[in-house]
Structure formats: structure tokens, C-alpha cells
């Protein structure tokens, strides 16, 4: 039982940076694996990054590896996505997701996550 609220999206130019936040309510947040997904108009929801409950394991889509960093602060019930060197193809609605299980091999699938936020729009354009 967790509620997720994303924030931090906006309109930026190519090469700029944004830091997305996902605030979670619920005492069990620290036991949840977390993920970020994104969805552009007309496309399927796409895996971006995931992090284990302790933060010791992180995974990234090849398209964002080296540019994006996922992190979490369990004391603040918050997960972050630092996005650097943004490109136009990063434009999408970004969703935070929580998995009510240890992070496993199916972490790239949106269907494995139990809770979702409403999303925050990221637009990269000149």
C-alpha cells in the first residue's frame, strides 16, 4: 500500500539536466524495489532505470546509461532520477513505479510493478 507522486519535470533544451523526484507514502517504502519508466505518445511504456530496496543494485536502459542516475533516500521515502545531457528523444511522460518484491530479473517489465504514479512530463526541445 503505497502512493507515488512524481515531480520535477519541465521543458529544457538539449544538453540540459533535470532531477525528477518520486515521493512515496507508506511505512513499507524501504522494502520496495523502485523503477522509472517513460512513455512517449503512441509508444509503449519503456523501462528507464531500477534500484533495489537498499540502493546497492541499479540498472539502466542502454539509451540512458551514463547520462541518468537513479538513487533513493529511504529516510525521506523518495526516489530520484538525475537526468543529464538530455536529448530530444528523452521527451516523454516519466512514471515512478514500486515493486512489492525484491528486485528480480523481470525488473524491465512494467507488468512486474504494483504501484504507479501519475507521471511528470519531460520535454527536451530547442
Image: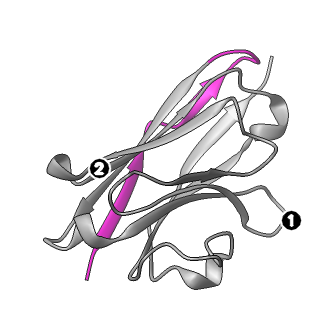
Q: Is residue 6 magenta?
A: yes
**Residue 118 in view here:** no
Question: Mark 1, mark 2: which one is toward the viewer?
Answer: 2
79 and 41: which one is in front? 79
| Quarter occupied by the C terminus | top right
Marks 1/2: CA–CA distance: 29 Å
Q: Which of the 4 quarters of the picture holds residue 109?
A: bottom right
Q: Is residue 33 above or below residue 93?
A: below
Q: Earlier in the sequence, mark 1 or mark 2?
A: 1
Residue at (86%, 65%) from the top-left corner? 42
Residue at (76%, 18%) from the top-left corner?
A: 14
Left or right: 17 with respect to 29?
right
Quadrant the N terminus occupies: bottom left
> Residue 42 — which label?
1
What stretch of residues is rendered in magenta?
1-16
Q: Position of residue 5 (x, y in %)?
A: 36, 57
- Disc 2, SS: strand
- Contact between labelled residues 2 and 1, with CB atoms less than 8 Å apart: no
Q: How many marks?
A: 2
Please, is residue 85 above or below residue 103 in the view?
Answer: above
User: Residue 60 at x, y = what percent?
Assistant: 67, 50
Q: Is residue 53 above or below residue 113?
A: above
| Mark 2 neighbour class, 10 Å CA radius: few under 14, some 14 to 19, many 20 or more | many
Q: Is residue 115 magenta?
A: no
Tag 1, which secondary structure?
loop
Q: Position of residue 2 (x, y in %)?
A: 27, 75
Q: Give left or right: position of 60 versus 25.
A: right
Disc number placed over residue 114 in the picture, else none: none
Res 72 visible: yes
Tell me the crowding category of disc 1: few under 14, some 14 to 19, or many 20 or more residues within 10 angstroms, Cα based: few
Residue that numbered label 2 is attached to: 78
Amino acid at each position: 500500500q503505497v502512493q507515488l507522486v512524481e515531480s520535477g519535470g519541465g521543458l529544457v533544451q538539449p544538453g540540459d539536466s533535470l532531477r525528477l523526484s518520486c515521493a512515496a507514502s507508506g511505512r513499507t517504502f524501504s522494502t520496495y524495489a523502485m523503477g522509472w519508466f517513460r512513455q512517449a505518445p503512441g509508444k509503449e511504456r519503456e523501462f528507464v532505470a531500477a534500484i533495489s530496496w537498499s540502493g546497492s543494485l541499479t540498472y539502466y536502459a542502454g539509451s540512458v546509461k551514463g547520462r541518468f542516475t537513479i538513487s533513493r533516500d529511504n529516510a525521506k521515502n523518495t526516489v530520484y532520477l538525475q537526468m543529464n545531457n538530455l536529448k530530444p528523444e528523452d521527451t516523454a511522460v516519466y512514471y515512478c513505479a514500486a515493486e512489492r518484491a525484491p528486485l528480480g530479473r523481470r525488473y524491465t517489465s512494467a507488468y512486474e510493478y504494483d504501484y504507479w504514479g501519475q507521471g511528470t512530463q519531460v520535454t527536451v526541445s530547442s
